[in-house]
Amino acid sequence: MQCPRCNWQNPASNTLCFSCNAPLAASASAAAAPAAKAAKSAPARPGNAPVFPGIWPRLGATAIDAVVMVAAMVGFSTAANLTYVALTGNPHSGLLTMAAGFIGLMLPALMDAWGGGSPGKRLLKLRVVNRNGDNPGILRASWRHLMKYALNLALPGIFYRIQRAMFGERAMHNWISSTYVVSSLADPRAVRPAIAKTRSVTGAGKFIFIVLGVLALVAGGMIIGAIVMNPKQEDNPLRAEVIRLDLVSQPVRMLAENHYRRTGAYAPDMAALGVTLESLKSSGFSALSLNPVNGVLRFTIAGEPGTADAPALGGKHLVYLPELRAEKKGGGVRRWQCGSDDIPRADRPYSCRHEAGASAP
């Protein structure tokens, strides 16, 4: 190396000039050697690992956490009992035992929320984060923890397959609690973009949700219908008789529909419909009155009036109110709303509970 002061040629290892003792500048190779040595000895920084780990590290972390959790429950409960007995001299407290055991049960969740992760996740370089890539917080972590172990222990194997089909690698407890399991070796700057690209539910999961939703609606409708319509109608003889009379009155209603379709007006009396008193009585009715204004038909049921000891429908009425179809759909009578002004609702089927008595002639 040439001295900048006296131009003496010195060996490359010299730091002072042999001739004038002037300091010599270090060579580029000599300066680069310590830096390379330091870089080689420094530990590797995280950032190259994928954001989302595979299933096996997660299962391993779950198994480790389960062992720690059981040990913590037993240890905390035992310590609480021994402390309680030593301080009070009384037998152990069941409530205190349960409280201490619950703390042990929730220990992995507490570590996920406040620390760097549960023991299993620390060992396998995993951590739980929310959508923003931050610690999930105590409530979210606790909810996730309880759902995870309760559901997987309740339906082992089967539940795991179902939730994998619906939620993929993320699992149901993470979807419910809005959390994600990521690798602690991943680049922190890549966590949030990776989370933003994840799907909450798989295509198979959406299909299962739709099927379950439809089944729930159908089941709910059947239950409501069974409650409202009261399937035990045959237990009430009066209700069964009303159902029969409703059927035999249908031909008269069809005649009233045809009359309205032909003339555009409601029939004023039985003669306009071509109904005779004899044919009416053969159907179980003693009279029929018609309202030409609103088209209401009021059938009087034949027979003797009932008593408190022997109820009957004689002398009571079935009332039918026409509901018209829109003119753009062809007009005419769309349907008849069945009701009564003197038959109790309990003695009428669900299809004949319209309050049509107020419109009766």
Image (tube, rainbow, N blue to C red):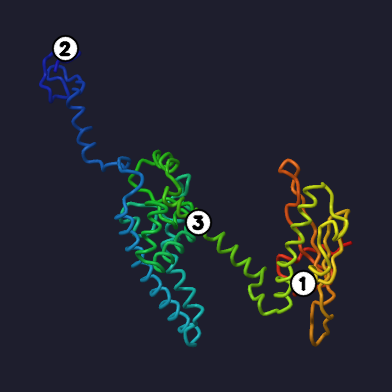
Residue at 14 percent across and 18 percent down: it is 1
Q: Position of residue 127 (x, y in %)?
A: 38, 52
> In this rendering, which labeled residue sits more in front, label 3 or label 1?
1
> In this rendering, which labeled residue sits more in front, label 1 or label 2?
1
Question: What is the three-letter code of the residue carrying label 1?
Answer: Ser
Question: What is the three-letter code of the residue carrying label 2?
Answer: Cys
Upstream in the sequence, badge 3 or badge 2? 2
Q: Position of residue 73 (x, y in %)?
A: 40, 72
Residue 106 versus residue 90: which sits nearer the camera? 106
Mark 1 vs 2: CB contact within 8 A: no
Mark 3 vs 2: CB contact within 8 A: no
Residue at 58 percent across and 63 percent down: it is 220
Disc 3 crowd rating (10 Å Cα; few below 14, some 14-19, many 20+) is many
**Residue 282: which disc?**
1
The residues tagged by marks 3 and 1 sit, at their Cα atoms, a distance apart of: 73 Å
> In this rendering, which labeled residue sits more in front, label 3 or label 2?
3
Upstream in the sequence, badge 1 or badge 2? 2
Upstream in the sequence, badge 3 or badge 1? 3
The kind of secondary structure element at disc 1 is helix
Disc 2 crowd rating (10 Å Cα; few below 14, some 14-19, many 20+) is few
Q: Can you identify the residue that label 3 sits on?
A: 140
Instruction: State which quadrant residue 194 falls in.
Output: top left
Residue at 80 percent across and 52 percent down: it is 259
The kind of secondary structure element at disc 2 is loop
The kind of secondary structure element at disc 3 is helix
Question: What is the three-letter code of the residue carrying label 3?
Answer: Arg
Q: Position of residue 346 (x, y in %)?
A: 75, 74
Q: Can you identify the residue that label 2 sits on?
A: 6
Please state, as top left, top right, bottom left or bottom right, where the C terminus lies in the image.
Answer: bottom right
The residues tagged by marks 1 and 2 sit, at their Cα atoms, a distance apart of: 142 Å
Instruction: State which quadrant residue 255 falls in.
Output: bottom right
Q: Is residue 229 left or right of residue 284?
A: left
